Image (cartoon, helix red, strand yellow):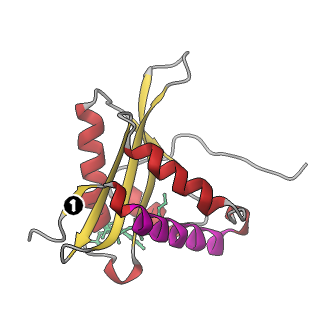
Amino acid sequence: MEGVPIRAARRGDIPSLLLLWEQMLKENAAADPRLEPHPRAREHMAAQFQAWLSDAQRIIVVAEEGGRLVIGYAAGAIVPGNGWQAPTTLGEITDCYVARPRRRQGIARRLVGRVIDQLFEKGVDTCRLQVGVHNEGSRAFWASMGWKPHEVVYERPV
Ligand SMILES: CC(C)(COP(=O)(O)OP(=O)(O)OC[C@H]1O[C@@H](n2cnc3c(N)ncnc32)[C@H](O)[C@@H]1OP(=O)(O)O)[C@@H](O)C(=O)NCCC(=O)NCCS
């Protein structure tokens, strides 16, 4: 089965990307209040999407239904390693979101696959990402594709 077409994001997608990104933040904050976005987060992210789209180190792909409705997206970046461990350059999956009614149809798997293919073409051989510890669905998704925990981020109020 072919499924929903996946293509590179363009400037005209920014309003849709922002809507999906806001939904992603809402879901993440519902699972863990520490992930609540600040009041100017949308403004910040609008500028980020603009910048990412013209950055050769960044990739954004969208799943578009019916030639007009963006129902999911994934984004990745090439980032430096820490400088004292291999690899010197890493891929990072920064975002991945699929609208609730379209889940469990393999769309995120295809979106991420496309980002990873492009990161690999740009010379990356290892990718990382962060996922909320309470985000059970997402953790199951990444585990289903062979991703394994690497480091655990600890936090406490001071
Ligand atoms: C995580 C997310 C991107 C998955 O999108 P999706 O399109 O439904 O994922 P896929 O259909 O490609 O799933 C592939 C496999 O991952 C696993 N999987 C996906 N979602 C799962 C869930 N909620 N629970 C358990 N396993 C899950 C399954 O093995 C699935 O294969 P199957 O449906 O044949 O069993 C989506 O649920 C989402 O947008 N969540 C909210 C945002 C978020 O948390 N983003 C990630 C931040 S890192």
Q: Residue at x 35, y 67 (%)?
A: 72
| Among the 4 quarters of the image, the one containing residue 2 | bottom left
Residue 148 appears anywhere in the view: yes
Measured along the vertical axis of the image, is residue 38 above or below residue 130? below
Residue 133 appears anywhere in the view: no
Measured along the vertical axis of the image, is residue 151 above or below residue 140? above
Q: Is mark 1 within 8 Å of ligand 1?
A: no
Q: Quadrant of the N terminus?
A: bottom left
- Label 1 environment density (alpha carbons within 10 Å; few <14, some 14–19, many ≥20): some
Residue 117 position within the rendered picture, expressed as x and y whole percent measured from the top left: 23, 42
Residue 8 position within the rendered picture, expressed as x and y whole percent measured from the top left: 26, 52
20 part of magenta stretch: yes
Measured along the vertical axis of the image, is residue 26 above or below residue 8? below
- Single out the residue that lies furthest toward the right: 158
Q: Given the image, on which type of amino acid does mark 1 rest?
A: Ile
Decide if residue 91 is on the left or right side of residue 33.
left
Decide if residue 76 is on the left or right side of residue 23.
left
Q: Residue at x 19, y 71 (%)?
A: 4
Residue 53 position within the rendered picture, expressed as x and y whole percent measured from the top left: 38, 46
Q: Which residue is mark 1?
A: 6
**Total of numbered circles in the picture?**
1
> Viewer-proximal residue, 31 or 94?
94
Q: Which residues are magenta?
A: 14-32
